[in-house]
Amino acid sequence: MGALWNNGTNNGLWIEHTNGGNYILQSRNNNSDSTIDSQVAAANGVFHNLEIRCDNDGLTIEFIVDGVSKGVITTNIYTGGMEFRMSNSVVTTGNGMDIDKIWIAQDA
C-alpha cells in the first residue's frame, strides 16, 4: 500500500488495515502518532477510493473515503523530506489491497 515515509527517523504518513479491519490513516512524527479510523472495513471484492489531502503548508492532512471526509490530522505531521513507497505487511487469508490508481499532486 502507498506510504510517504522517512525510514531513517521512522516518520511518515500511510494507510493501513488489519484483516477485516477498517482503513486507518496514520501520521508519525518523531515516533509520535496521530490516526484517523475511517469506520470503513476492508473487504475482498469491495472497492473504495482512499484519498490523503495535505494543505499547502503541510500542517493539515485530511482522510477521505469514497468522497466523504473521515477526519483531519493536525498533530504529529512530519514536514521533512519523505519518499513514496509501496509495501504490503503480512496479510493472511484474503483482505489484501489491490491498487487501481495512484495520483500524486502538489497544489500551487
Image: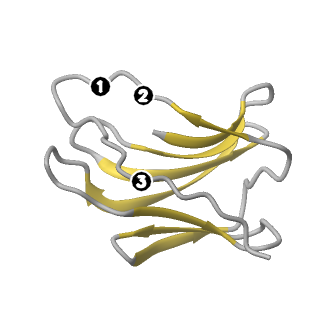
Residue bearing the label numbered 1: 91
Q: From the viewer's perspective, is residue 35 above or below residue 14? A: below
Q: From the viewer's perspective, is residue 105 above or below residue 90? A: below
Element carrying mark 1: loop
Q: Residue at x 79, y 25 (%)?
A: 8
**In this image, 61 relative to 92: left or right?**
right
Q: Which callout, 3 or 2, points at the residue further toward the start of the chain? A: 2
Q: How far apart are marks 1 and 2 (CA)?
A: 8 Å
Q: Residue type at mark 1?
A: Val
Which of pointers 3 and 2 indicates the residue nearer the eye?
3
Q: From the viewer's perspective, is residue 14 above or below residue 95? A: below
Residue bearing the label numbered 3: 101
Residue bearing the label numbered 2: 88
Q: Residue at x 25, y 49 (%)?
A: 42
Residue 35, numbered label? none
Q: Residue type at mark 2?
A: Asn
Q: Which residue is drawn at 80% across and 76% down?
A: 108
Q: Residue at x 17, y 31 (%)?
A: 94
58 or 33, which lies in front?
A: 58
